[in-house]
Image (cartoon, rainbow, N blue to C red):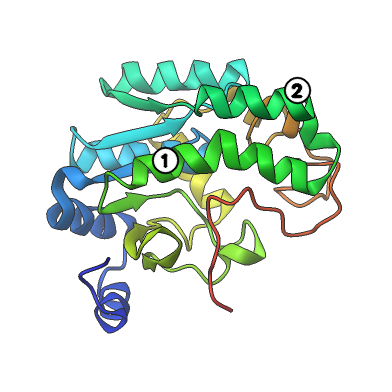
Amino acid sequence: MSKFTPEQIAELNEKLETPEEVLKWGFDTFGTKIALASSFGAEDVAVIDMLNKINSKSRIFTLDTGRLNQETYDVMDEIRKKYNTNIEITFPDAQEVIDMVKVNGMNLFYESVENRKLCCGIRKVHPLNKMLDTLDCWITGLRSDQTQNRGNAAKIEIDEQHNGMIKINPIIDWTWDQTWDYIKANNIPYNKLHDKGFPSIGCEPCTRAIKPGEDLRAGRWWWENESDKECGLHMDHKT
């Protein structure tokens, strides 16, 4: 459970204005029990750059679902080399994946929303939860304009979905353009799928490039009709 009250968190959100101030507070408060959850999208690589300027030993972990694009693995290696950092890689439980595929097939996610959420749960949510059980605070690259669910997120939150631990979203109020301005200004390696029309990148079979005029997350689970699609990693923001 969080050692902070909602009132203390609200005060911190008023006091800490820049992403760097928020991240420094996180490191000063949680030490080695804080880590960034990174999928190596544009937002995450920007946060990685900030992290390394503040604390070169900052922890970064990623969820390797087993269905990622080669370009995602490429940028992981580029980031590792540029910042001389260790990336902690988590994997889904092998038996859970075997059982799921045996019953539902390899591409079950195309068949129903329930199947897709089952796959996301096994390949992403369960590994995330195991990692978060070892931490007191986690960092994300969320931006509030990505989905309706993220619109009410704050820079620092009590994460009720994960036993009341602290969750830090340092660039929650950034725009897509601000993110890219930072990447270019700091010469940060990024996923080359962004150059091919992929603003949001997940698993290879579940992500496509977007068409002109489409929402930035329209390419995620593109066969579904819901307008506010999530995988379950970031939920429970109160309206």
Q: Quadrant of the N terminus?
A: bottom left
Residue 46: assigned label: 1
Residue 7: assigned label: none
What residue sits 19% from the left and 33% below the top?
56
Q: Nearer the viewer, residue 111 or 210?
A: 111
What residue sits 36% from the left and 40% below the top?
131
Of all residues, the one furthest to the bottom in this rendering is 7
Across and down, in percent, residue 178 comes to 50, 51
Q: Which of the 4 image quadrants contains residue 24? A: bottom left
Across and down, in percent, residue 29 comes to 15, 58
How far is disc 1 from disc 2 in space, using C-alphas?
33 Å
Q: Count of labels shown? A: 2
Query: Of label 1 and label 2, which has the lower sequence position?
Result: 1
What residue sits 83% from the left and 50% below the top?
213
Q: Nearer the viewer, residue 218 or 50?
A: 218
Q: Is residue 85 left or right of residue 202?
A: left
Across and down, in percent, residue 66 comes to 58, 21
Q: Secondary structure at mark 1?
A: helix
What residue sits 32% from the left and 73% below the top?
13
Q: Name the residue type under label 1.
A: Ala
Q: Which residue is mark 2?
A: 106
